[in-house]
Every structure is written in C-alpha cells, then in structure tokens.
Amino acid sequence: MTKTAVIIDGKAVAEKIQGHLRSQVEALVQKASRPPGLAVLMVGDNPASAAYVRNKERSCGKVAIASYGRHFPTETTQEELMQAIAELNEDDRVDGILVQLPLPKHLDAVAAINHIHPDKDVDGLHPVNLGRLMRGEPGLCSCTPAGVMALLKNYGIDPKGKQATIVGRSILVGKPIALMLLAADATVTMAHSRSPDLGAITRSADILVVAVGRPELITAEMVKPGAIVIDVGINRVTDYEGKSRLTGDVNYDSVKEVAGFITPVPGGVGPMTVTLLLQNTVKSYIRRLGLD
C-alpha cells in the first residue's frame, strides 16, 4: 500500500517566521532609533521582476521593515546604477540592499552586486559572503538555499548522516545549498542536467534538491522511496490547449506517490525566499546597530 508524501507547506512556514520577525522587530525598535531598512533596486519594466518587487515591498510592511526601493528606467547607465548603490551603502537607514535580477542586457549584474557592501548584501551573493559560507563563518547567506534549510528544520528533518543530492550547480542555489548541507553533516553529491545517467545519481538521495530550470525533469523512477524532495524550480509551461501553468523541476503528481516529503510549486520554496530576505535584513540591522 503506497503512502502519499507529506506536503511541505512553504507558505505556512514563511508566515510563521514572518510572525516571529515582526515580534522581534517591534521589540528591537524600542531599543533603536529606527526600524530595519531594505532597499530593492529595479531597472526596467520586466513584468515578472515588477511583481517580485511588489511582493518584497508588501512583505516588508508585514514585519515592520522600512522599504527604500528605487525603480529606474530601462536606459539607466551602469554608472548611474553604481552611484545609487554607493549612496545606499552610506545610508544609515538602510541595512539591506538587493538588485533585482535580471537587469537589462546593457548592465553588468555581477559588477552591481559586487558594489554592494558585504554587510548589506541581503541576497548573499557578494564574493565576501560566499567566501564566508565556504569557510563556515558568520555572514549573510543566499536566501533561497537558506529558505530550504529553514523548511527542513521546521519539518524536523535533520540532514546529519543523510545522503543529499543537489541537481543544479548555480551560484544562486546549487552551490550554496551544497555548502549548507555539508555544514549540517550531510554527505553531498552534486549533479546537473549534463550528468550521465542522472537517475542513477538521484535514486541514492535521502534528500534531493532540484534547481535546474527544466520542467518536470525528475520523475518517480528517479526518486528513492521515502526521500525528501525539495523542488526549487519554477517554470511556466503551456499545454496542448494553450493554457499556461506553473510547474517545478519535479514531476509532482508522480513523485509525491514515492517520496516521503515533497515541496509543491507554487507554495513550497518560493515563499521562503522572500522571508529569508527579510530575516537577513533584520540580521544585518541587529549587527549594524549592536542590538545583539
């Protein structure tokens, strides 16, 4: 008799963490002269980016973080963007800076991210913060991988002694989550879309994290029975009737009949990314004002 996987509810966990953050911020503001501040910079009019930015700004309000977002026209130059970042680096009201990606093609995203002060890099992508993660030192960690770790913790899943396989090697998710799982005493295997016989690799995983951006790449026969499956992918696909829907990198309907735990798309990892962005902002605020 088969048993359907436990659904990991990222929205519920995110709301729980945001509730704790709001209580924490309300208490801290009594000691400080201001609330935490987050500045999200967006260049251009990409509809998906605009929706993400609105969500981040709304989320700031939920946890009493001040939002100092700035939206720039598409024709903004690299020099203008770098100047805006430099001003925010010096702004004492701002504890976190995030450059919304993707940027228009004429702009250098890596240069922009590297221009953010590491202690305000709440997206955790500055080389200093990635180096701190590699060395196991305190720092601001990439939001999506940190969100995955928070989901595991909230569902009582301890990676210690487990075989973890990461499918995807991006600097945004794959590499940071591998380091985080290693730090949690998992044995980690890195794979990707070009790994030969991918199924043979993924079938050995007790924890399978998939972040490659390929719709429904992982199917039931590629998953170990009882495995914890974390689907980071989010893809918009169109069916034969022309209807659009969101799907992950995992074939959810088939894999949920094999896995022990699984994240849905949407509603799994996605809500955690914004929540960890808020948590990083509060962490930076506490450190910068000496409130710890």
Image: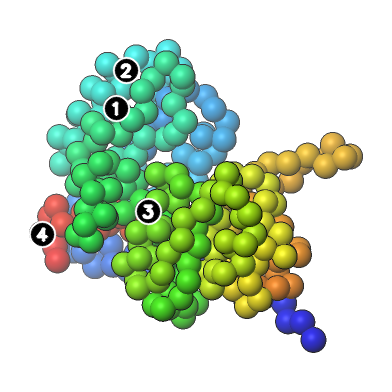
Q: Which mark is residue 111?
A: 1
Residue 291: quadrant of the picture:
bottom left
Distance from the alpha carbon under mark 3 to that under mark 1: 20 Å
Mark 2 or 1, closer to the camera: 1
Which secondary structure lies at badge 2?
Answer: helix
Closer-to-camera residue (269/250)? 250
The residue sitting at 79% across, 86% down in the picture is 1
Distance from the alpha carbon under mark 2 to that under mark 3: 28 Å
Whole-percent x, y for residue 59 in the image? 44, 52
The residue sitting at 38% across, 16% down in the picture is 76
User: Is residue 58 in view?
Assistant: no
Disc nearer the start of the sequence (3/4): 3
Amino acid at circle 4: Gly
Disc nearer the start of the sequence (2/1): 2
Q: Are marks 2 and 1 in contact (CB under 8 Å)?
A: yes
Amino acid at circle 2: Gln
Disc nearer the start of the sequence (3/1): 1
Amino acid at circle 1: Ala
Distance from the alpha carbon under mark 4 to that under mark 1: 30 Å
Q: Are marks 2 and 4 in contact (CB under 8 Å)?
A: no
Distance from the alpha carbon under mark 2 to that under mark 1: 9 Å
The residue sitting at 33% across, 30% down in the picture is 110
Residue at which label 3 appears? 176
The residue sitting at 69% across, 52% down in the picture is 216
In the rendered view of the protein, which quadrant contains the C terminus? Answer: bottom left
Disc nearer the start of the sequence (4/1): 1
Residue sticking out furthest to the left: 290
Distance from the alpha carbon under mark 3 to that under mark 4: 27 Å
The structure's colour scheme is rainbow
Residue at which label 2 appears? 78
